[in-house]
Amino acid sequence: VTTDSVTASLTEPTAQQPEQIKNREPLITLAKEPEERRAADRRQAATPTVEAGSIRVSIDKIDALINMVGELVITQSMLNQLGEDFDMARLAKLQEGLAQLERNTRELQENVMRIRMLPISFAFNRFPRMVHDLTQKLGKEVELKLSGEQTELDKTVMEKIGDPLVHLVRNSLDHGLERPDVRKKAGKSPVGLLHLNAFHQGGNIVIEISDDGAGLNKARITAKAKERGLVGEEEVLTDEKIYELIFQAGFSTADVISDVSGRGVGMDVVKRNIKDLGGTIEVKSEEGVGTRFTIRLPLTLAILDGQLVRVGSDTFILPLVSIVESLQISRDNVNVIAGKSEVYKLRNEYLPIVRLYNVFGQTPDSTTIEGGLLVVVEGDGQRIGLFVDDLLGQQQVVIKSLETNFQRVEGISGATILGDGTVALILDISGVIQCSRRMPFTPSDYSAVIQQTAAA
């Protein structure tokens, strides 16, 4: 069994360097970070340039990669030599060599992935000019602050996140930040603040788009949702549920349709694009204070930190970023609703139980609730408990796309080849939640996916 290359050919970012604005009274100012910080960023990495079909790579990254390849070849040679004259006395040396090979391979992998990394400044560079033009058109004054411009992420991720960022910025300028006269009446500075910030957090990159504008109008959003039948007339919603409504397809509170925003075709697309990248978006807002959108994305689309779980004789991989916790099941905490739906009471929260063997048509070790484990996961703002037979450990896996082999299968985001040569499917938690509400896989469906992946 061989794996396909997980690196696809890429198109170039559309972000352009901002043009110099001359002889105009500025309505927008670009906030500068302290000179010390900027100097440190310049010392840390020279900004690469992008050419058609290629990436210009720092010589330091190339040197590190070459050195690691040399170390890997040496370690491989050592192991080959041990294999020619192996006995039990050499077992300790073999284990030591394998450990060294694992370390070198991991370091080589990290250096190879770094070659595909570009600073997010390529995506941020379009915003000074864009914000300047829009603020003049809208009659607003805005200070744009960019932070973390040297934060790196995979080239593919950056290219695909560009359009969602543009929409969020336009939405903030049009709906979030007020006109100068309105801000003065509210006791604010006439100049609004729009802040884009990027930083690494664990194995993810976090991008924040925040403003000090009017904030989301919860009453108006709720009224519009009731008008469209999205929520019941007497239904009481938490702030989080209200904010999630803005991501409904076609949802807009704008009274006037403009070419800036209010067309009702944006926020749902933003969320879908971010979800397709394996990311999440959340909203925090306070009326009269401002709004912050927080986007979390994987640094790369090629590697995943996963938790291996077993269902019957098959292995699945859950993304670690989706896992909240895992636990032994207590029968006393299990309740049945409407005679069929199981929920688990966990610290005063009721979690729907999804039995993976029902979703994917497997034969489990045990169907009794006490015979398995519950993995609490989160997707699309909802927590559920996945019922599995066993936890097999955590590991980094190389993601192999299924779309070219078997179209797009709901509940599955990809696959990987494990160390023993078997195929394990990588689960899409949001898709599993949706899939569990409808007809499950049949055993033949599951077998077809596995066979297509192994044969690719």
Image (cartoon, rainbow, N blue to C red):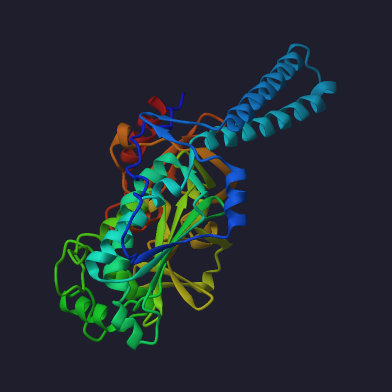
- Name above or below for residue 86 compared with residue 238: above
Where does residue 84 sit, x and y in percent of width and height? 74, 11
Please identify the quadrant where the C terminus is shown: top left
- Name above or below for residue 315 compared with residue 339: above
Toward the viewer: 23 or 140? 23
- Name above or below for residue 149 compared with residue 398: below
Along the horizontal axis of the image, is 186 left or right of 309? left
Where does residue 442 sit, x and y in percent of width and height? 31, 44
Residue plotted at (36% across, 49% down): 18
Q: Which residue lies furthest to the top in this view?
A: 84
Q: Can residue 284 be seen in this view?
A: no
Q: Which residue lies furthest to the front in this view?
A: 23
Where does residue 364 sit, x and y in percent of width and height? 46, 49
Toward the viewer: 403 or 103? 103
How many numbered marks, from 0 up? 0
Q: Which residue lies furthest to the right in this view?
A: 89
Where does residue 138 sit, x and y in percent of width and height? 23, 69
Toward the viewer: 332 or 23? 23
Can you tell which quarter of the image residue 454 is in?
A: top left
Q: Is residue 166 visible?
A: yes
Residue plotted at (40% across, 40% down): 156
Can you tell which quarter of the image residue 223 is in?
A: bottom left
Along the horizontal axis of the image, is 335 left or right of 83? left
Residue plotted at (37% across, 83% down): 288
